[in-house]
Image (tube, grey):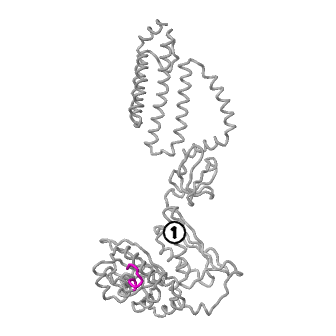
């Protein structure tokens, strides 16, 4: 026995095995939190082991030749096993880096895992064949039978796995894309794995859809080729209005909505004309599917405003549910009264009080391109938009940036009326527009009689100041407020009720 160990001690491969074991152990201790350092140590060990084995005449891909010394044979076998495992690890690591370089970490994960399994299995078979000198044909035959049994038992799971591989290759969607799966599941793709695709729905729920179901379903990727997505809404009006007039108002509502893309023209089509009403479909486009709900809500609100200000009613569902016509009531309401019903600061007032204000309004007509307010102008009246669309732009150097669009029921002139400050924005007409003017003298009694209306107007002042980047304590504002009747009343009103001035 001693002779055996003495003979083995003279083999340099034993010293190499001890050196490699020590190097691997030290690398785990020194580079525990540095995976790159451990990887470098492994590559160095693999290169050193390859050189030494070649010099010793040991070929890793040939059967191990016994030397007659058991200890030496064990050491040679361990070194060959280490070489095959390190070689497999090196190839798998190279593939991982390759997938990352191609910027496909999510899509390539399935393929990488599959190839890694094949590589490690190949290394295991090579160890059996070239280290233990055992035939692998029987193992392959046995593994084939076992694979058939497992395939039948795991048919559904394997279907998901292979479908995931197909989806990984074809890439109909990527993580981050918004997809619609067969009209049943819609949301943003979060992750793709071996079995399923994880989708975050619009309700912020996580839907886990099996890959096999997706592979057989109709997939609509709304993020490809661009993120532009079309949204359609249907509206039905009373049949006593010509379709051309309604189409014009729907186009203005689309122009009024800043949440939609105006680089792609909205499409308005007449779907049907019946005795109960005329149906229209409005298709508009947004930048991404996540904004669909907000854009749709804003669009429907603007459609209602433009139709209501024009005196066009929404149709009822059927003849049985239609409201009884009241021609006297309809004829008695003027357009100015319908518009004041849409103004939020006048909502606290009664219908009679709004009718009294409507009788005092003065109408002004503007053509497209007309400038209603210039920067630096002090507006002394409150103006209410009755028809059309206005653009509000802040002057930024040579070019102005649009910050707001106004439609029926919106108003401007709050800063000049309440603070006496000059306007920092330009307001111009995008379409033929009609605005109503309410002077300081007419607005003062309204605010005095309704504290709620004054509070809403003060909040509107804060919004306009933020939009125009105007400070409420600016010197021009303070100077003008001293001569402004409404501004003086406003300060007195807020002191009386213990409120902070806007």
* In the image: residue 442, left or right of residue 146: left
Q: Residue at x 44, y 81 (%)?
A: 455
Q: Residue at x 62, y 73 (%)?
A: 271
Residue 247 placed where, x, y %? Answer: 55, 78
Q: Quadrant of residue 13?
A: top left
Which residue is nearer to you in this view: 182 or 480? 480
Which residue is nearer to you in this view: 204 or 112? 204
Residue holding disc 1? 295
Magenta segment main secondary structure: loop
Residue 134 placed where, x, y %? Answer: 59, 18
Q: Residue at x 48, y 8 (%)?
A: 4
Q: Is residue 321 magenta?
A: no
Q: Is residue 496 magenta?
A: yes
In the rendered image, the residue lying farthest to the top is 3
Using a 10 Å C-alpha cutoff, classify the residue at mark 1 as few (fewer than 14 neighbours), some (14 to 19) or many (20 or more): many
Q: Residue at x 40, y 72 (%)?
A: 403
Which residue is nearer to you in this view: 135 or 501? 501
Q: Quadrant of residue 114?
A: top right
In the rendered image, the residue lying farthest to the right is 320
Residue 372 placed where, x, y %? Answer: 38, 83
Q: How many marks?
A: 1
The stretch in magenta equals 493-502
Q: Quadrant of residue 50?
A: top left
Point out the image quarter for the C terminus. Answer: bottom left
Element on which disc 1 rests? helix
Q: Is residue 320 above or below residue 40?
A: below
Q: Is residue 365 above or below residue 203?
A: below
Residue 351 placed where, x, y %? Answer: 54, 89
């Amino acid at each position: 026995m001693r002779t055996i160990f003495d003979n083995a001690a003279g083999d340099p491969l034993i010293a190499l095995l001890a050196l490699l074991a020590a190097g691997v152990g030290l690398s785990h201790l020194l580079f525990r939190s540095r995976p790159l350092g451990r990887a470098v140590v492994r590559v160095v060990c693999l290169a050193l082991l390859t050189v030494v084995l070649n010099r010793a005449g040991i070929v890793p891909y040939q059967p191990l030749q016994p030397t007659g010394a058991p200890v030496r044979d064990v050491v040679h076998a361990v070194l060959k096993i280490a070489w095959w495992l390190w070689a497999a690890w090196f190839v798998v690591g190279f593939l991982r880096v390759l997938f990352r370089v191609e910027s496909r970490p999510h899509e390539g994960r399935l393929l990488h895992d599959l190839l890694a399994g094949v590589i490690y299995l190949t290394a295991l078979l090579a160890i059996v064949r070239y280290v233990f000198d055992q035939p692998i044909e029987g193992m392959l035959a046995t593994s084939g039978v076992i694979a058939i049994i497992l395939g039948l038992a795991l048919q559904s799971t394997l279907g998901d796995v292979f479908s995931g591989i197909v989806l990984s290759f074809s890439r109909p969607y990527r993580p981050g894309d918004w997809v619609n799966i067969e009209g049943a599941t819609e949301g943003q793709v979060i992750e793709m794995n071996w079995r399923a695709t994880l989708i975050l729905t619009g309700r912020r729920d996580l839907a886990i859809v099996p890959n096999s179901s997706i592979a057989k379903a109709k997939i609509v990727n709304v993020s490809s080729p661009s993120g532009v997505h079309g949204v359609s809404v249907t509206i039905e009006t009373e049949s006593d209005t010509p379709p051309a007039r309604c189409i014009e108002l729907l186009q203005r509502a689309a122009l009024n909505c800043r949440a939609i893309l105006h680089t792609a023209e909205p499409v308005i089509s007449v779907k049907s004309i019946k005795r109960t009403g005329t149906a229209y479909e409005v298709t508009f486009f947004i930048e991404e599917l996540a904004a669909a709900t907000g854009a749709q809500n804003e669009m429907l609100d603007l459609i209602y405003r433009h139709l209501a200000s024009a005196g066009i009613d929404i149709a009822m569902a059927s003849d049985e549910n239609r409201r009884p016509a009241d021609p006297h009531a309809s004829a008695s309401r003027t357009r100015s009264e319908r518009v004041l019903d849409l103004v939020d600061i006048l909502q606290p007032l009664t219908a009679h009080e709004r009718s009294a204000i409507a009788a005092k309004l003065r109408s002004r007509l503007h053509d497209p391109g007309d400038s209603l307010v210039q920067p630096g102008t002090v507006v002394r009246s409150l103006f209410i938009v009755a028809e059309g669309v206005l653009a509000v732009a802040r002057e930024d150097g040579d070019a102005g940036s649009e910050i707001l669009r106004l439609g029926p029921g919106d108003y401007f002139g709050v800063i000049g009326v309440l603070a006496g400050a000059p306007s920092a924005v330009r307001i111009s007409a995008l379409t033929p527009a009609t605005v109503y003017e309410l002077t300081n003298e007419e607005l003062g009694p309204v605010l005095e009689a309704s504290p709620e209306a004054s509070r809403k107007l003060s909040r509107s002042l804060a919004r306009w100041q933020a939009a125009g980047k105007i400070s409420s304590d600016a010197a021009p504002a303070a100077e003008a407020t001293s001569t402004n009747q409404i501004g003086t009343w406003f300060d007195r009103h807020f002191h009386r009720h213990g409120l902070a001035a806007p």
